[in-house]
Image (spheres, rainbow, N blue to C red):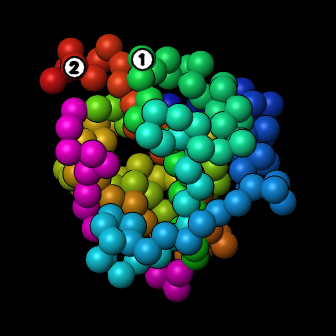
Amino acid sequence: MNVVDNFLSDNDFETLRDGVLNNPNFSWNLSYGVADDLDGDTYFVHEFYKNHAPTSPHINLLSPVLEQIQPTGLIRIKGNLYMKGSEVTEHNMHTDYPYKHSGFIIYLNTCNGYTKLEDGTKVASIANRAMYFNSDEPHCSSTCTDDIFRANININYYNEQTFTNA
């Protein structure tokens, strides 16, 4: 795992954040199940890329991110939006896919939510913070209590390190 604060320039981050969170033409879809379909949790998702192709007209918002992470192949890109709760709810541990790949999260707002890894490490949601991690290893997300939502973008991809660090 590697955490990078101030991942994007201020201008690039504001363009990304505003394009996702302050754009009336940006759609979020309700998803039943955060870690799996049967966990009883709900959240909102925006799919940018899936099944080897862009699925969103807003994919270009991610150009500065993709330029920095330099994937050799994309698996999926999705935005996640978890609504505020009366207490922080930690979702079930899960892996994004059952095969070796790399993961990347960029947090769009600062709140008391987090991403937790199997070893107990918690990465706080701080705007413009990025986390590189092995998303084929167990991890989980959480809600927040101190903002109206918690938002991030999750990228599953391949790169040279995906298999050299196996």
User: In terms of image quadrants, where is residue 140?
Assistant: bottom left
- Residue 79, x across and y down, in percent: 56, 52
- 29 to the left or right of 11: left
Residue 137 location, x and y as percent?
A: 21, 44
Q: Are marks 1 and 2 in contact (CB under 8 Å)?
A: no
The range drawn in magenta is 85-100
Q: Quadrant of residue 21?
A: bottom right
> Is 28 rendered above or below residue 137?
below
Q: Residue at x 47, y 82 (%)?
A: 87
Q: Is residue 27 visible?
A: yes
Dot 2 alpha-carbon crowd within 10 angstroms: few under 14, some 14 to 19, many 20 or more: few
Viewport quadrant of the C terminus: top left
Q: Position of residue 95 (x, y in %)?
A: 26, 51
Q: CA distance from mark 1 to mark 2?
A: 12 Å
Q: Which residue is pictured at 72% across the width and 50% down the height?
A: 20
Instruction: Answer with mark 1 or mark 2, whichever residue precedes in sequence.
Output: 1
Q: Is residue 117 visible?
A: no
The N terminus - image quarter: top left
- Which residue reaches farthest right? 24
Q: Position of residue 111 (x, y in %)?
A: 58, 61
Q: Is residue 33 magenta?
A: no
In the visual, does 7 lie left or right of 118?
Answer: right
Residues packed near mark 1 inside 10 Å, few (<14), some (14 to 19) or many (20 plus): few
Q: Name the foreground residue: 62 vs 130.
A: 62
Residue corresponding to mark 1: 72
Which element type, helix, strand or loop, lies under badge 2? helix
Residue holding disc 2: 163
Residue 59 badge: none
Query: Which residue is at a point 20% across and 38% down the rendered structure image?
Result: 99
Foreground label between 1 and 2: 1
